[in-house]
Structure formats: structure tokens, C-alpha cells
């Protein structure tokens, strides 16, 4: 019998929740039983967290799969739920956002102030002719106006399409055109790596190609010189002078909220469409449950950019619907020094931190002495998202950032799922380093084989979702057929997420990366994630990326790229010895089948702007091909660094 995906890594450490946290946790173990009994009743109860102006008639309409309707007939206003109701409840003076700019400037914005700014922006958009159902593109740095712009769209029923501020003219204009956006909201620029970085010129070029755009609203952030055209309006001359009163009208629970483009691993970006009632219900519930948010006392910080779904769900909609106080930071983690994040944690007494494995591994590379210099005693819950987190990075995060006191929640989800789907609960779960553990209450995830049959404990396969969930994508914008083909046709009646996973002997889930990245070595399907984790478990390795390269004898052979930790020596024979040691270490950890044919010691890895490793480029290197498209690389010089740094690290063959 052929296995679907090999299960090689054994990890037996387990960390129960701190007693005090468990005693006061927002969600207890009963939630699982409650949801298992009747998951629709469970989600209806969570929807009661929000204020509806008309209650739904039915929780779910799944009569026309895969097109779901949640909270059918219900009506609400998303911005009202994120702002007005907190002010009405007497919490207008609570800080919504502690914002810190990269140069060190800061702004404190209360819920009452955020409501005022959002109302003004809503009035301005209305004056510009934007009506419910129109699309608005947002291309901004990490400044409070980004959240205001999104909320203002939500308030008037316009659909926002946020485009990450690092994207090019082509990416921006393609997205504006696909959504036929009427207005673009941007800034002169933002600060990155100590310098103003312009945005407006990119918008000018993009808008020239986009006849649908009628107006461009420009926030002044850096004060740099900008070209000015007929469509341009300054934010401070319009929004900041607009009427601060705006009455929020209600929209249907299935009214579109936003489009967010994701390229996944394939070429043309897909506009993932999310709607209001179900999306806000699940982001609000999961933000409360997974982070155990206490809005009166916690200070929450998600380090993601607003241009990614994490910024939508866990900077804007989840936290604000829950009345959270949060930190928002404009810049990069090493400007002006490598302790910037920890300085911010201390300054604002951050208690909940949500970040990505790529950042954690960068911090590992920089060394634990940097966080050690800061007071991190305010932290109580740590979260991770975006990629599988290797057990060693998880432990490093727990020890060096959480100082051994804070639960770590590894949260699995996607742009398409809209909200967290699989995660430990910090007051309930005895978490295992590197495992996302169980589907949240109300969510039904499974691991299946090629034929769509559940694999038993100890087996690996494809991660699927068997039941619809409130914050699910509703379609691919303008392309229902692509929605069906991409997500619902691999397995009958199931959503296939594209990820491989295994279920351990206790039934807990381990994400193994995209199935497109799985390597076929001598007839075994081996996940790149497991080999990367084995490499990172060696004390000399900070980060690793693994790819399968064509091999005449084994079909594919494992080729690894490893970044040594800060203090490790790699010159001359020291490098050769380390490579041998690492190959043997992987063989000892996972078995001889997983021993890399080749390991290259490199200073950096090619990553997308959201921090995912671009294995496609590494495969080109491993197979001695000329490089493919490098335009989505975060730093395009990385591939040169790898090519030049590589020579020292070539290993002999077995
Ligand atoms: C893909 C989705 C979810 C918001 C940010 C990324 C990978 C995400 C985890 C995790 C293992 C993870 C998956 C997923 N991923 N979180 N905790 N463990 N893998 O959103 O850009 O839509 O990417 O990111 O491969 O399918 P996205």
C-alpha cells in the first residue's frame, strides 16, 4: 500500500496552559462538546456577540453548494459593530490604536476618535459618488488611515480591495482593473528601513491604465514631493474637514465586505470575496477565543501588514469588533535597531502578540541576547500564523519571548477561510510545539488520502474542510467557475485547502506545507516542512528551506538551504564539517530516507513579501536552471547572495 504522505517527525514535548489563564479563560473545553452537538446552533450563539438590526431567519443556506449563505435575512453594519456600539456602551475613551511610526512618531486613537475619523471618511466617499456595492482600492502604508479607510468602506457598504503597499504598478493596476475600482485611497509614501518610500508614483502609473478610477484620495504621511493630477484629492483637505456625523445604515449579512487577492502558488491572482455577517462573527469569536482577549486589560499586537488577510481579520475586524486596545506599527523590525519590536512590547505593555514564523526565525538568527535586553513581562499569550512553525522555533518563541510563561497558539487558516480554523485554545489545550492541534469548536477539518477517505491517527494526507464555516470565501470575484474548480473539485463535497497534514497518534494535526511542495524520494512522499524542522532542530541552524530536485536514481533528491545561527563559523573546513553533521542529523532525526543529498549554507532565503519561502526559485538553483520570475521577492538581491554564498557550501555526494 502506498502512503499518501510520510509521517517522519516525532515530537513528544507538550505544554499545558498556565493554571491562572485556564481558570479565567474566555473559552473552556465545553465549547467543543457544545459545537459538536449542533454546530449551527453554536455559530448562531456566536453571532449574538454582534449587534444586528434585523435578526437572521436561517443560520445557513447550503442548498446550492459550494455557494453558502450564512445568517440569511440578517442585517447589520460592520463599522457600527466595530465602533459605534463601543462608544454607545461608554467606552469611547478607550484606546483603540496605539500607533507608532517607524521614525518614532506616535499617535493614540480612542474608539470615539476612530468613529469620528471613519464617519468623516464615509461622508467624503459618499460625496465622491461611492455607493453601496462600489469597489474602492486601498494602497496605504501601516498608518491608522488604512484602518479608517477600510471601516469607512464597510460603513457605506462599499467593497474594499486592499493592495499591499509593497506591490508594483502591474500588481496594483491588475487588481484595480479586475475589481473595476472607482476610488483609490493612497498616501504620498510611508517609512521603511529608515527612509520615506514613495507610493503615489506607483498609483499615478497604475491609475493611468485604469479607466474605472474617478478619484484618488491621498493621505499626507511623509511630506515628500508628489505629482498632482485632476483626479487627486488630499485626505486632510477632504476627510479631515468633512462632517463627523454619519449614520450607519444596515446591510444584508451576505453583502460583500472585501476582495483580497491571493496568488497562492499559481500565477494569476484570485480575488477572494468575503461578506459581512459570517465573516464578522467568526473573526470576532476566534479573536476572543484563541487569544483569550480581555478588552479592559489586554494590549494586543498583530505584526502583520494590513495588506494581508491577517491584517483584515486580526488588526481591523476581529479586534475592533471586540473593543480591543491594540498596537499598530508602521515599519520594519530592525529599524533603527534589532530590538525595535521588544522595545514596543515594553513601551505599550503588550500582553498578546501575534506574529509569523519567518519573523521568529529571523529573531533566532539575530540571537536571544536581543530580546533578553527588554522587559517582556507584560506578555501572556503568543500566536503564530502564516507557515508551519518548526518545533525549535516554537520553543525558542516560548522561551525567549514568552519566558516560558505564555502559551503559544499556532493558528492555521488562509485568505480563503477568512478566520482561524485550527488552533490550540490557550486556556484549554496542552499544546505540542509545531502542531496547530485541533479544529476550533464549530469547524470540521479532516486529513484524507487520495480517495478522500479519512486517514487514521499516525497517517498523513490532504487537509480538507468538510462543513461550511461562517467566514468562508463566497467565490472568486467575477469567476464562480474558478472558485468551484480551485477549491471544491479535488474531493467530492469537501473544500481542499492545498495543504498537506498529518494526524498524530493522539489525533492532533500537524501542517506539512503545500502539497505542491511535497518531494517524491524513492517512492516516498516527504514533506519539505519535516526536513526543514529537522534542520532547524540543530543548534547551528536558524532557518532552512528544502526542495526536491530531479535525481537520476531516486526520482527526486532532497536539496536543503540552511542559514546558520549568528555565532556559527562556516569558513573553509568548518563549513564542510557542519554540512556533514547536518546531513547526519536529519538522517538520525527522520530516518535515512530523508537525508539531504546536498546542503547549501546561505546567508538568506528568498521570501515573498508576506514571508513565505519561494521554493520555486530554490528549485531552479538546485537544478542549475536560470532563475524564473523574481518580481514577487521581498528582496531581489537575495538570489545573488545565495548564488555567491553557495559555493562554499556544496557537499560531496554519498
Ligand atoms: C497558507 C495560507 C492565514 C493568514 C496568513 C496566510 C500556510 C498559514 C499556517 C500555520 C502551517 C500555515 C498554509 C495556508 N499557513 N498558517 N499555522 N501552519 N501553515 O494566508 O497567504 O492565504 O496563506 O499559509 O499553507 O494554506 P495565505
Image (spheres, grey):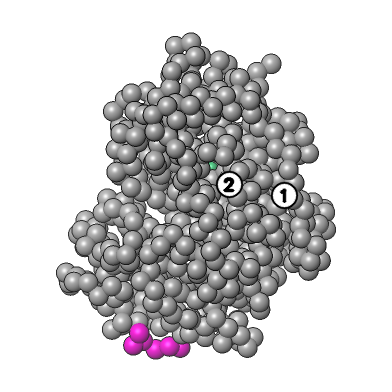
Say left or right for 266 vs 495: left
Residue 431: which numbered mark, if any? 1
Image coordinates of residue 549 in percent, x first then y, are 44, 23
Say left or right for 33 vs 443: right
Residue 413: which numbered mark, if any? none
Mark 2 / mark 1, whichever is N-terminal: 2
Determine if residue 377 is in view.
Answer: yes
Residue range in magenta is 240-245
- Per the image, the residue denoted by label 2 is 393
Image coordinates of residue 281 in percent, x first then y, are 63, 64
Determine if residue 492 is in view.
Answer: no
Question: Who is closer to the viewer here, 131 or 150?
Answer: 150
In three-dimensional space, the C-alpha distance between marks 2 and 1, rounded to whole angstroms, equals 14 Å
Give the residue drawn at x 44%, y 59%: 338
**The N terminus lies in quadrant:** top right
Q: Secondary structure at mark 1?
A: loop
Mark 2, Cα crowd under 10 Å, few <14 / some 14-19 / many 20+, is many
Asked whether mark 1 lies closer than 8 Å to ligand 1, one says no
111 within the magenta span: no
- The residue at the far top in this view is 553
Work out whether 329 lies above or below 7. below
Say left or right for 319 vs 309: right
Give the residue drawn at x 43%, y 22%: 651
Give the residue drawn at x 56%, y 87%: 93
Work out whether 434 lies above or below 616. below
Mark 1, Cα crowd under 10 Å, few <14 / some 14-19 / many 20+, is many
243 within the magenta span: yes
Amino acid at each position: 500500500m502506498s502512503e499518501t504522505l510520510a509521517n517522519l517527525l516525532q515530537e513528544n514535548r507538550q505544554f499545558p496552559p498556565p493554571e491562572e489563564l485556564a481558570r479565567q479563560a474566555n473559552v473552556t473545553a465545553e465549547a467543543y462538546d457544545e459545537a459538536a452537538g449542533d454546530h449551527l446552533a453554536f455559530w448562531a450563539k456566536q453571532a449574538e456577540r454582534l449587534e444586528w438590526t434585523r435578526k437572521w431567519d436561517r443560520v445557513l443556506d447550503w442548498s446550492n453548494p459550494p455557494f453558502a449563505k450564512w445568517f440569511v435575512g440578517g442585517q447589520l453594519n460592520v463599522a457600527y459593530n466595530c465602533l459605534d456600539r463601543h462608544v454607545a456602551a461608554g467606552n469611547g475613551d478607550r484606546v483603540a490604536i496605539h500607533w507608532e511610526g517607524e521614525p518614532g512618531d506616535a499617535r493614540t486613537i480612542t474608539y470615539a476618535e476612530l468613529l469620528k475619523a471613519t464617519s468623516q471618511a464615509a461622508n467624503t466617499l459618499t460625496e465622491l459618488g461611492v455607493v453601496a456595492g462600489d469597489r474602492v482600492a486601498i494602497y496605504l502604508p501601516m498608518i491608522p488611515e488604512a484602518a479608517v479607510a477600510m471601516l469607512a468602506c464597510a460603513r457605506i457598504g462599499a467593497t474594499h480591495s486592499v493592495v499591499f503597499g509593497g506591490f508594483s504598478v502591474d500588481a496594483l493596476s491588475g487588481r484595480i482593473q479586475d475589481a473595476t475600482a472607482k476610488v483609490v485611497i493612497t498616501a504620498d509614501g510611508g517609512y521603511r528601513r529608515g527612509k520615506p518610500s514613495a507610493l503615489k508614483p506607483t498609483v499615478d502609473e497604475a491609475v493611468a491604465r485604469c479607466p474605472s478610477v474617478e478619484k484618488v484620495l491621498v493621505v499626507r504621511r511623509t511630506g515628500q514631493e508628489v505629482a498632482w493630477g485632476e483626479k487627486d484629492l488630499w485626505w486632510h483637505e477632504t476627510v479631515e474637514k468633512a462632517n463627523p456625523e454619519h449614520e450607519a445604515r444596515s446591510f444584508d449579512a451576505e453583502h460583500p465586505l472585501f476582495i483580497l487577492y491571493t496568488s497562492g502558488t499559481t500565477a494569476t491572482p484570485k480575488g477572494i470575496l468575503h461578506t459581512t455577517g459570517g465573516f464578522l462573527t467568526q473573526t470576532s469569536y476566534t479573536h476572543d477565543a484563541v487569544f483569550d482577549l480581555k478588552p479592559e486589560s489586554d494590549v494586543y499586537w498583530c505584526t502583520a501588514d494590513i495588506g494581508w488577510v491577517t491584517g483584515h481579520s486580526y488588526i481591523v475586524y476581529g479586534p475592533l469588533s471586540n473593543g480591543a486596545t491594540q498596537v499598530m506599527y508602521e515599519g520594519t523590525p530592525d529599524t533603527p535597531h534589532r530590538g525595535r519590536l521588544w522595545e514596543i512590547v515594553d513601551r505599550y505593555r503588550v500582553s498578546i502578540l501575534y506574529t509569523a514564523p519567518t519573523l521568529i526565525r529571523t529573531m533566532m538568527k539575530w540571537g536571544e541576547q536581543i530580546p533578553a535586553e527588554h522587559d517582556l513581562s507584560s506578555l501572556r499569550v503568543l500566536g503564530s500564523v502564516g507557515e508551519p512553525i518548526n518545533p525549535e522555533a516554537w520553543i525558542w518563541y516560548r522561551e525567549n519571548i514568552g519566558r516560558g510563561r505564555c502559551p503559544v497558539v499556532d493558528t492555521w487558516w488562509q485568505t480563503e477561510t477568512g478566520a482561524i480554523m485550527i488552533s490550540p485554545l490557550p486556556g484549554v489545550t496542552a499544546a505540542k510545539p509545531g502542531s496547530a492541534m485541533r479544529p476550533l469548536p464549530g469547524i470540521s477539518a479532516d486529513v484524507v488520502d487520495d480517495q478522500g477517505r479519512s486517514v487514521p491517527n499516525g497517517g498523513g494526507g490532504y487537509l480538507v474542510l468538510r462543513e461550511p464555516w461562517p467566514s468562508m470565501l463566497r467565490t472568486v470575484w467575477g469567476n464562480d467557475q474558478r472558485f468551484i474548480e480551485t477549491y471544491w473539485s479535488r474531493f467530492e463535497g469537501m473544500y481542499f485547502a492545498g495543504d498537506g497534514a498529518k494526524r498524530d497518534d493522539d489525533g492532533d494535526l500537524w501542517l506539512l506545507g503545500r502539497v505542491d511542495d511535497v518531494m517524491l524520494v524513492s517512492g516516498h512522499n516527504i514533506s519539505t516542512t519535516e526536513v526543514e524542522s529537522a534542520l532547524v532542530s540543530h543548534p547551528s541552524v536558524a532557518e532552512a528551506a528544502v526542495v526536491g530536485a530531479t535525481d537520476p536514481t531516486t526520482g527526486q533528491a532532497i536539496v536543503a538551504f540552511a542559514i546558520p545561527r549568528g555565532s556559527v563559523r562556516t569558513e573553509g573546513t568548518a563549513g564542510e564539517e557542519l554540512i556533514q553533521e547536518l546531513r547526519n542529523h536529519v538522517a538520525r532525526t527522520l530516518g535515512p530516507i530523508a537525508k539531504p543529498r546536498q546542503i547549501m549554507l546561505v546567508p538568506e532565503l528568498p521570501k515573498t513579501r508576506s514571508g513565505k519561502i519561494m521554493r520555486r526559485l530554490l528549485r531552479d538553483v538546485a537544478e542549475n536552471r536560470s532563475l524564473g520570475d523574481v518580481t514577487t521577492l521581498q528582496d531581489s538581491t537575495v538570489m545573488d547572495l545565495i548564488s555567491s554564498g553557495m559555493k562554499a557550501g556544496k557537499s560531496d555526494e554519498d
